[in-house]
Amino acid sequence: MSDATLLYLCIAIVAAPLVGFVLQYAFGRRLPRQGDWLTVLTIGVSLACSIVLFLHVLGQPEGYSTVLGPWTWLEPGDGAAWTVGITLDGLTAVMLVVVSLVAFLVHVFSMGYMQGDPKYWLFFAWLQMFSVSMLILVLANNLLHLFMGWELVGLCSYKLIGFWSEKRDPANAARKAFITTRIGDLGMVLAIMVIASVCGTFDFDAIFAKVASGEFSGPWLTAAGLGLFLAAVGKSAQMPLHVWLPDAMEGPTPVSALIHAATMVAAGVYLIGRMMPMMTPEALIVVAVIGAVTALMAGLIALCQNDIKKVLAYSTCSQLGYMFLGLGVGAWHAGLFHLTTHAFFKALMFLGSGSVIHGMHHEQDMRHMGGLWGKMRITSVTFLIGVLAIAGLPFVTSGFFSKDGILSGAWNAEPVLFWIGLVAAVLTAFYMMRLFVMTFMGAPKSEKAEHAHESPKSMTMPLVLLAVLAVCAGWGTWHSKLLSPPALDTVGSLAFEHVGTVVILASAAGIGGLLLGLFVFFKNAEHVPDWKKPFRALETAFANKFWFDELYRIAVLRPSYRLAGLFRVVDSAGVDGIVNAVGSSGVDSSKKSGWFDKYVVDGLVKLTGGICQFFGAGISLLQSGKVRLYLSLSVGAVALVLLLERLL
Amino acid sequence: MLSLLVFLPVAGALLCCALPAKHARSVNVAFSGLALLISIAVWQQMDLSAGGYQLQQQAVWIEAVGINYHVGIDGVGLALVLLTTFVSFVSAIASWNIDKLQKGYHMLFLMLLTGMLGVFVALDLFLFYVFWEIMLLPMYFLIGIWGGPRRHYAAIKFFLYTLFGSVLLLAAVILVVLKCDTWSIPQITALARQALEAGDAGGILGSVGLSLAAFIAMFIGFAVKIPSFPFHTWLPDAHVEAPTPISMILAGILLKMGGYGLIRIAYPFFPQAAIDSGLVITIISVIAIVYGAFVAMAQTDFKRLIAYSSVSHMGFVTLGLAAGTERGINGAMYMMLAHGTISAMLFMIVGVIYDRAHHRDIDRFGGLAWVMPKYFVLASLAFFASLGLPGMSGFVAEITTFVGAFDGPYRSWAIAALVGLVITAAYYLITLQKVYLGSTPDAYKDPVKYPDASKRELAVLVPLIAVTIYMGIIPSTVMDMYKGFIQTDLVPVLKAALETAGKAMG
């Protein structure tokens, strides 16, 4: 394909949903079916174009990469040119398909799930805008361009989490999400400042060239890399900025699937993957450690949650931690491959949970579920496939291949990280089985569960498709071709490898965790409270999410508000107080001088006035109203002036 | 043409006097609109690639002391003139429902417009100062007569505070004129450049100490207008009391006089002193950005909050300037233009709800989004524009300024200012939630008392948001307009001064 064709395809990918957003926002409410078909159509165009591009890149030799553009956007001075442009390589192609495919399925799913909502049309409008922003982010060929998409997805996330913001909790959650990720964005701005200053350009290739030539190196390079990672920590909900993601579950479930599982939260992983050549070894250690810690801690928290969406949210944190672990230890390919497979199976499970919530009339507490296996057959089966995929059932599911790649990388790099990852893998399988048992197996535990019903086709069809992908995405060698890593000397090999020992250990972890879960939560459900007793303290810690929210409330929020209050007082009493004091002392002194003024100065003035009045009275005699007198006076005055002029 | 632009509003003011009071507002809108059209014509007539002052007009005014009537315009002036006529025009529309003493109000409004336009085109220091003072009086009366309950206090505070600044400015101007023997701004700028290039650290005043003193006096004079910390406290009072359209002009245009003065006069006249005080100005700016944001967060009065957000955002202007880099100053200038439209919009947003609810207490509102959906969309756009969302002008301004400031001599301070971004997001989102989201209290549910934004209100807000978005998506149109002066005249001088300063220290 010629560059022009590629460009048109890329433009169509973004433009179609953009047009969809504008039309839907402006007219959606008045269209038949409130315009849902329109948005499905436009995102379908994006999907089709993405698939064409994907196949095109797949047909190219390994390591294919091309840049369309760049076009100058702004020349801000100092000879810099800030541009917009498109990078087209394997990573972009994969991300395009992941984003547009999941977005498309979520659109279709929402036609059923959001049915009857008073703002049905608006929901689709914002889904479109989110797709636009995310696709801009993925296509960008430079950091500034990427950052624009990055911030716009944040806005859409805010709008969609707070879709029901007439209620208090969604509004709070939306605000928390925006501000928390904004803290991370400071890192991005820092990186932008450093890169603009050192490189003078934001183009990925130019930055990497400067890194390779040694022009861009040292502490500022590490600082820029860590700044980017801070941004990724915020966006991808890693410790310690993960607190917003569980709250974000207040948003409609399709949003959770699209934004808070498959795409936006993965943008952080994408960012680090994209910027890999400028990540110094020091920065990568931080990435790996944060990733591993999050994978483990979020898994522990997920173990003790009872809200089905909260379990999935913490599971997302944990899996994203896995991806960062992979990137950090140099398993670049595996990390990004896990991003892809996770997008499919996590979107599957979120939409599955949406189907459950829909079937249970908005019940989210798993303690009230159970026994849905027979009542919601498609949902149950597809969900089970998702559970098996995330647990990494060996040699079949996609999750196995990608997770194994990450663990192999960790094994080669740092055994401690490997063991943390392995424990997290056991945990993942274990809590996912717990979720599955509580929701679908056993006897119904509530009235609602008794009367649960399967969801309509618009909701189950996406589930089926995602289930197929959750299994098959790992097959074949497409990913080793498209996700062929950049050649770097900062870290060792970024290639994909399977270490024999790791394959065995990882398989055992997945299967063991699943069986253990089945054994504990299904076979011995009645014994669980007894078994938990010795671990009461731990359970409290997990169930309370390690008190992160409380800690932030005491250590960050309250001091900030106090500081704001203090500054307010300082401002009105201190800064303005001085101004007013100066002002009132001016008034005082003017009162004193006023006395002087009134009786001495003004006295003189009055005296003058009196004198004037006296003369005025005399002069007023002249104002007789007689024209003759006026004329003769004027003539006299003119004569006097002329005379004076002559004399002087 | 420039004289026509400047004095046309005076003709409008006279017409206001002549016609019955009920026509005053139409005259105002017509003449503000005409001024907008003329300013666009000026833009078309200029050859921006050529640089330098264009469309100059010069006439001897007071021969004995060498004072000329001298006007001319370059890209920097043009950008601000366009901002002035545009914001004035929409503010004139926003003034439609002023019902007290209409004649006087609209007359003063047009007088104010003349003063503001005059400042941006004056090339003679005396003329500049005259226009500078001409602005003060209409503003004083507009706040003092048409303002809120504490209008007298606010008006007097505004007047005395800015007069205090003006006096310092005048003192510095007189010093400069005595030494240089000319009132011409371009000539003095050239003299300053020559002095610097000749290696004379004393600059146009021939003395380092005197230059610094004069620069500080000028800086304070302009800083009061910006307003920079710690000279900002007149602003919240003035805003809270001023009627909505006057707040829009105050925030949208008047504050830009300070930044313009620094770019056009203080920095070019005293580059060495400006660079030497760079650290202090940077610190003041960072305090303004962060502290202003914190104080804004603690406000319960909607209008006061927006006023403090102005303090915070205008901190970027001095931050970029103090860095002395092209990107820094271009960003600072962009911030002035972006803030001009965004803050005008924000004050209109407050005005719309104040007209209906007759109070501005953030904590007493709630759920207005569901009662006034169109208004909510515009309000949230304005909020997000102000907190720097890409696609709108604030983002371009912030990112350019940050990059420029980081490139300058005070890196760590630029990083410190980043905190402001989070606080800004926090107070805007908290306010957005308190006022517009959540459940609607019964008091606000009455659609008769709380109708959605009217056509007139939309006519004010929609053009403002359109320009804000345009400036966010295609920023080069605007930045290319003014960056010539900064690139060829201002930054080289500051760079040279920086080198001299470096030598002096090393």
Image (tube, rainbow, N blue to C red):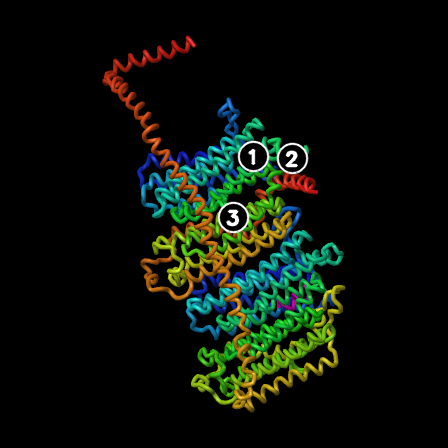
Q: Which residues are magenta?
A: A88-96
The image quadrant of residue A409 is bottom right
> Predominant secondary structure in magenta?
helix
Residue indicated by mark 3:
B314
User: How would you rate the neighbour count of disc 2 (Cα within 10 Å): few for under 14, some for 14-19, many for 20 or more?
Assistant: many
Whether residue B120 sits left or right of residue A489 in the image: it is: left
The amino acid beneath tag 3 is Met
> Eyeballing the image, is B391 above or below A262?
above
Q: Which mark is residue B201?
A: 2
Q: Is residue A380 magenta?
A: no
Q: Quadrant of the C terminus of chain A?
A: top left
Q: Which mark is residue B54?
A: 1
The answer for how far apart the CA atoms under marks 3 and 2 are is 30 Å
The answer for how far apart the CA atoms under marks 2 and 1 are is 31 Å
Q: Are marks 1 and 3 in contact (CB under 8 Å)?
A: no
Name which of mark 2 and mark 1 comes first in the sequence: 1
